[in-house]
Image (spheres, helix red, strand yellow):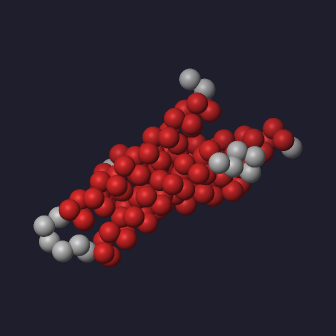
Amino acid sequence: MTSRRVLTALSWIVGIAFIVLGIVEVVARVMADEPANWTAIALWSVTLLGGGALVLVGSFAFPERPGLSTALVVAGCVLGVLGSAWTILLPILAIVLIFMRMRSDNAGLRTRA
């Protein structure tokens, strides 16, 4: 498996995992027996749903602009890690994605120069 394919697969996994985890957390908070804590719902929405969206947009929407793409992926990973630190695995995958993304961009810059 090439490094590009691994990067693509990891981007999908991290982005979708953040979004699914965000949806589960928001639904669990809304459906809980106690009154909804809108601050917690906003926290989960911004960190997990926003982080997942940024990872996916950064990974696939701007292939011709690697700097912007990497910045969006890094921002999405940082946001997602804030909301998913308790899972252990997702933050590790997000950190690996950041390093792979930066390495991929640096390799692209070397071939263009």
- Which residue is at a point 50% across and 41% down the rendered structure image? 12
Quadrant of the rendered image containing residue 106: top right
42 versus 20 height, above or below? below
Q: Residue furthest right?
A: 113
Query: How far from the left and from the top, in percent, is residue 33?
Result: 13, 67
- Which residue is at a point 45% across and 40% down the rendered structure image? 13
- Which residue is at a point 20% across and 62% down the rendered structure image? 31
Query: How far from the left and from the top, in percent, is residue 48?
Result: 41, 59
Point out the image quarter for the N terminus. Answer: top right
79 horizontally vs 32: left or right: right
49 horizontally vs 35: left or right: right
Quadrant of the rendered image containing residue 74: bottom right
Query: How many marks can you see?
Result: 0
Query: How far from the left and from the top, in percent, is residue 7?
Result: 57, 37
Point out the image quarter for the C terminus. Answer: top right
63 horizontally vs 79: left or right: right
Q: Is residue 21 visible?
A: yes
87 horizontally vs 77: left or right: left
Query: How far from the left and from the top, in percent, is residue 11?
Result: 52, 42
Q: Residue 49 versus residue 4: which sits nearer the camera?
A: 49
Quadrant of the rendered image containing residue 104: top right
Q: Residue 38 versus residue 79: which sits nearer the camera?
A: 38
70 versus 60 height, above or below? below
Q: Is residue 74 visible?
A: no
